[in-house]
Amino acid sequence: MRVLIAPDKFAGTLTAVQAAEAIAAGWRRRAPDDELDLAPMADGGPGFVDVLHAALGGTLSAVTVSGPHGAPVPAVVLRVGETAYVESAQAAGLHLLDGDPETATSRGVGELLLAAVEGGATTVVVGLGGTGTNDGGAGVLAALGATSDGVLDAGPAALAPVTAVDLGPARARLAGVTLVAASDVDSPLTGLFGATKTFGPQKGIGEDRIAEVDGWLEGLAVATDRRTSLEKGAGAAGGIGYALLVLGGTREPGIDLVASSVSLASRARQADLVVTGEGAFDFSSRAGKVPYGVAAVASDALRPCIALAGQVLVGSREMRALGIESAYSLVELVGEERALGAPADALADLADRVARTWSR
């Protein structure tokens, strides 16, 4: 039997590469004669560069950029031919947030972009997701040379007095460069479904602060390009998506970009079964997340798709709406303590158990 193993990361415990290897290890224990094809996946968030490097090769260049509160943090630029890939979470990730999110800046993402451009890339793909910043991408604009009548790179709180922004220098810096925002988020920059309302609480912005912070981003949009702020994906990564779009970038669903890069469709057609997974499998997985994207590819190839997850938080009806035949919970099998304490071993055990049902 041929099995395509295409999981996302298990956030906080396993990278996508590690998850794929753990699933394969467990599957082989139960079905050693099965042919396994490992295709670790990402949607633009943490792990985006690692997954693409594993699939495409290329060269990694180490750089140091500004973290959300100004401290230097390490990051990498992946170069494949004339295209560079960078990951916003490396410079502005939620895991780097060590202070007030209202003073956290996305400047480091702009510095990553600069490093890619100065390295000679003519196309730069920016993976968006998993960020702790919520500044509308103002820090990105500042790093690229944009100026204003206020401060752009000191977090959303500093945007309150901003009424005018000159994007000319930033656009000039990117002249001749194709910019792509790889995102799993459709949100606009502001409003009821915008960056602050939708994702602000998980970054530490209190419910009582949502309206004011959203108002600051609205002011940034008015000072730059209100129409673009309404586009799908403008609210990705706390508004970094907006900065990329307003600088002339285009948006592409991260899962589609990665699936194309790893030739997932052709590999699915050669498989008998597709296995995907992520840390928490819930109905939000439909919003451009890896399991939904992988399941769609499997469906097009007329192949069944199953999911292994840390937790399964949907019922069978919702699961099938997502294109998943069956989903299996790591916590349910081994308990939360072991799932978090020895995630690779636990995931291998789950894969072993699942192979007993699905391998033939």
Image: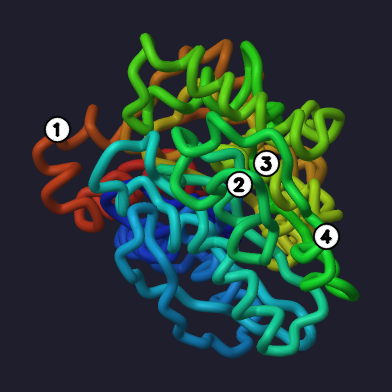
Please provide percent x and percent y for residue 140: 60, 56
Q: Which residue is mark 3?
A: 293
Number of marks in the rendered image: 4
- Of marks 4 and 2, which one's residue comes earlier in the chain? 2
Q: Are marks 3 and 4 in contact (CB under 8 Å)?
A: no
Q: Is residue 185 left or right of residue 257?
A: left
Q: Which residue is mark 1?
A: 335
Please provide percent x and percent y for residue 328: 38, 32
Of residues 322 and 353, which is closer to you in this image?
Answer: 322
Q: Which residue is mark 2?
A: 137
Locate the N terminus and report the quarter of the image it occupies.
bottom right
Q: Are marks 3 and 2 in contact (CB under 8 Å)?
A: no
The type of residue carrying mark 3 is Gly
Position above or below: 191 against 291 = above
The type of residue carrying mark 4 is Gly
The type of residue carrying mark 2 is Gly
Q: Residues within 10 Å of mark 2 (few under 14, many from 20)?
A: many
Q: Residues within 10 Å of mark 1 (few under 14, many from 20)?
A: few
Q: Which residue is mark 4?
A: 168
Q: Residue at x 60, y 39 (%)?
A: 136
Please provide percent x and percent y for residue 205: 36, 25
Note whether residue 186 is visible.
Answer: yes
